[in-house]
Amino acid sequence: MILAPNLGFRTIPTTCTTLKQQKDPPHQLNPVIPTKTKACECFDLHKELIPYGKAWSWQKQIVKQKQALIQEHEDCPDSLIILQHKPVYTMGTGSSEKFLNFDMKKAPFDVYRTERGGEVTYHGPGQLVMYPIINLRNHKMDLHWYLRTLEEVVIRVLSSTFSIKASRIEGLTGVWVGNQKLAAIGVRVSKWITYHGLALNVTTDLTPFSWIVPCGLQDRQVGSIKGLLQELQSSTRCSEAVKPISDDDELIDISYKSLIKEFSEVFNLETHQKAIDFGEEH
């Protein structure tokens, strides 16, 4: 199934595209910190498998609500949705079908063409997806700064929680450990309200990535936190330093808590749980 994007939005080249203007060296991001911590409502679905189409519609609904509040000069708090998706492929506005290694009529999963930038990627169980819907007027009205700051969140999670040294690659968007991409980032901004976001592979089955050319990058690999930890634990030099994780659910929970913590600190936000009005069925 392919959905066409709505018109009238600005596309930001993100998830898999080259950013020629990036000049920030890895680990030297200095986020602009507001003088006062702002509130951020958090919709926590990190243990749920949410159909992509449902979450996509929900994001756009929240964006419209925020734009209406701004037009009425009312307070517009930031929002954060965190969840997992049922298996799905998503494409950006200008994505090419040449990066699909299957016949579209016989796709293994649903395929959505969205209004984000970038090429095709995969979402599925074991991958934590964060959709920040924030008003950049309250942070910094700079799209490249926003992308680098999302990357910083993941870099800090991997370092502080798992002792994994991650980095950026100049000219590409996302977070990398060596040649493996652990986090993909693809955003859309409408009147300075962001949506779409980042996807971090935690315990993800990486097989579905082999049925596409992820992000249109032929010479790059995809990795996961679980896979890297297993590599470290199998190394005689590192096995004693790496704390074993009992199961996938525990690893997801640890990663979720770290993502919320680092997101709140990097964006200087105070997150609070909000009841989810998501319909009776997911």
Image: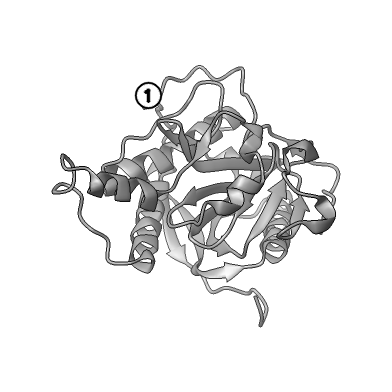
Instruction: From the top left corner, tell me how far across and down residue 256 is, in percent.
Output: 40, 59
Q: Name the image colouring.
A: one colour
Q: Is residue 142 visible?
A: no
Task: Report which quarter residue 217 is drawn in.
Answer: top right
- Left/right placement of residue 96 relative to residue 174 reads right
Residue sitting farthest toward the left: 240
Q: Which residue occupies 20% across, 55% down?
A: 243
Nearest the eye: 236 or 226:
236
Q: Which residue occupies 76% across, 53% down?
A: 112
| Residue kind at label 1, given as amino acid type | Gln
Nearest the eye: 72 or 103:
103
- Left/right placement of residue 17 relative to residue 205 reads right
Of the 4 image quadrants, the one containing the N terminus is bottom right
Instruction: From the top left corner, tell me how far across and down residue 223 is, in percent.
Output: 46, 44
| Number of numbered discs visible in the structure rendering | 1
Instruction: From the top left corner, tell me how far across and down residue 261 is, in percent.
Output: 36, 52
Nearest the eye: 13 or 141:
13
Q: Mark 1 points at which residue?
A: 28
Q: Can residue 88 be seen in this view?
A: yes
Of the 4 image quadrants, the one containing the C terminus is bottom right
Q: Determine whether 5 is above or below 165 in the image.
A: below
